[in-house]
Amino acid sequence: MNDHKFEQCIKCTICTAYCPVVAVNPLYPGPKQAGPDGERFRIKNKFFFDENLKYCMNCKRCEVACPSGVNIADIIHSARMRYGHQKPNLRDMILASTDLMGVMARPVAPVVNAVAGSKAGKWAMDTFLGVDQHRTFPKYQFKGFVGWFKREMEASQASYPRQIAFFHGCSTEYQHPEVGKAFVQVMNALGFGVQLLDEECCGVAMISNAMWKQAKQHARHNVAAFEKAVDAGLPVVTTASTCTFTMRDEYPHILGVDNAKVRSSIVLVEKFIHDLVDKGKVKLVFRKDYKARMAYHIPCHMEKLGWSIFTKNLLQMIPGADLTVLGSGCCGIAGTYGFKKENYAYSQAIGQPVFDEIARVNPEFVVSECDTCKWQIEMSTGYAVKNPILILSEALDLEATAKANCVNG
Ligand code: SF4
Ligand code: SF4
């Protein structure tokens, strides 16, 4: 919860210079005014609350830039929760209920994909819901990750010498099961059996859409599941940067859900593998015939986590990888933010420098740990975006890696 770090603000305005929203949206007061400055007034009188705080994308770039360690975006979103009158409309609830929508869409995935991709479907969503018609929706998959895992992989997992718990997240289950499959293959090759958690959506989209009660329920459910895993000696390993960041930091800072017992055990797979390699606990054997020219887009929440160095180092270990690390910049999607009609133009304007740089670099594909960055960059540039664990699964000689790690699996 907000612990009043606003008093540390030295009014340097660096946060305002780094905020991608304030540069394109004149309605947004900016991080300094919305955060520490506004908080001084709000704690005296709640009527100073400004509903335009809803334009904050919660990208955390202001917090990364702040020299005084002010938790600016936490202050803004805690204020939205305490004083805001924003009630989610039907559009917001649909966009934020990622797991519920996934469960409903999966059995009729080809129909949902066809409608969401058609001109008439886009027009209807724009007109009746307020989802911008220029937005491309990710495709739902008929067969998800969990079903595949239970059918083909679960029985063999106990035979591995070490075990981890995997938080796969909504997009791996409903849209990109290949990420989960790659994760299991790589972890097995490194000698780790994978166990699934009783997980729910991390709730980040609910936080953005003022569904505070539901976000807290999800947070409490996930923390309880993580506590069980941690009590059993299992780290919780993830593949999506925003889920990871939300479960580590937004649960206690915005939702007030205590995760102290498990926070340090929630770790992105790139950091997890990097730490193991660093300590000499696993060996990676790469394919000699793998060659790829890739550009790494660092998601905003990876910058906040400070973990992009691990992904970069891992990718640089691949002998055939020609890696360009793109300049720091927000792609503009911010989860559900860029789907909304009222934000679409801002979202694209924010992402334009990133899109331009990708076009200049002209890689074979882009790398990113964030699925919504993937959707935004693929839609706006035409370049494919891959999760780093997918690249590792393609670049590693999985059999030789398993041998090198004495896995009989
Ligand atoms: S979180 Fe992002 S959008 Fe919000 S104030 Fe900070 S920099 Fe601006
Ligand atoms: S960057 Fe930090 S110290 Fe500077 S104005 Fe913003 S909140 Fe205050």
Image (spheres, rainbow, N blue to C red):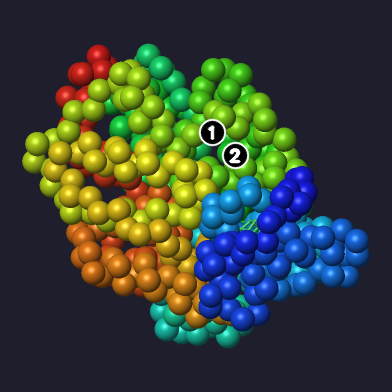
Q: Is residue 63 shown above or below 319?
A: below
Q: Position of residue 171 (x, y in %)?
A: 46, 52
Residue located at (22% from left, 64% from top): 361
Alpha-carbon span between mark 1 and mark 2: 7 Å
Which corner quadrant holds the C terminus?
Answer: top left
Q: How many marks?
A: 2
Q: Quadrant of the N terminus?
A: top right
**Residue 233 marker:** none
Residue 146 visible here: no
Q: Locate residue 329: give its quadrant.
A: bottom left
Residue nearer the viewer, 37 or 251:
37
Residue 301 in the figure: left or right of residue 175: right
Answer whether labels 1 and 2 touch (C-beta < 8 Å): yes
Q: Residue at x 67, y 73 (%)?
A: 29
Q: Residue at x 62, y 61 (%)?
A: 12
* Residue 274 vertical position relative to residue 337 in the rendered view, above or below: above
- In the picture, measured across the screen, residue 60 lies left or right of residue 70, that is left
Please tell me which residue lies in front, 267 or 32: 32
- Does residue 250 appear to the left or right of 151 in the view shown? right
Could you say which disc has been placed on residue 266 in the image? 1
Q: Earlier in the sequence, mark 1 or mark 2?
A: 2
**Relative image position of residue 322 (x, y in whole percent):** 18, 49
Q: Residues within 10 Å of mark 1 (few under 14, many from 20)?
A: many
Q: Quadrant of residue 382?
A: bottom left
Q: Is residue 345 visible?
A: yes
Rendered view: 367 above or below 317: below
Closer to the camera, 356 or 63?
63
Residue lying at 34% horizontally and 70% vertically, measured from the top left: 355
Quick one: SS at disc 1?
strand
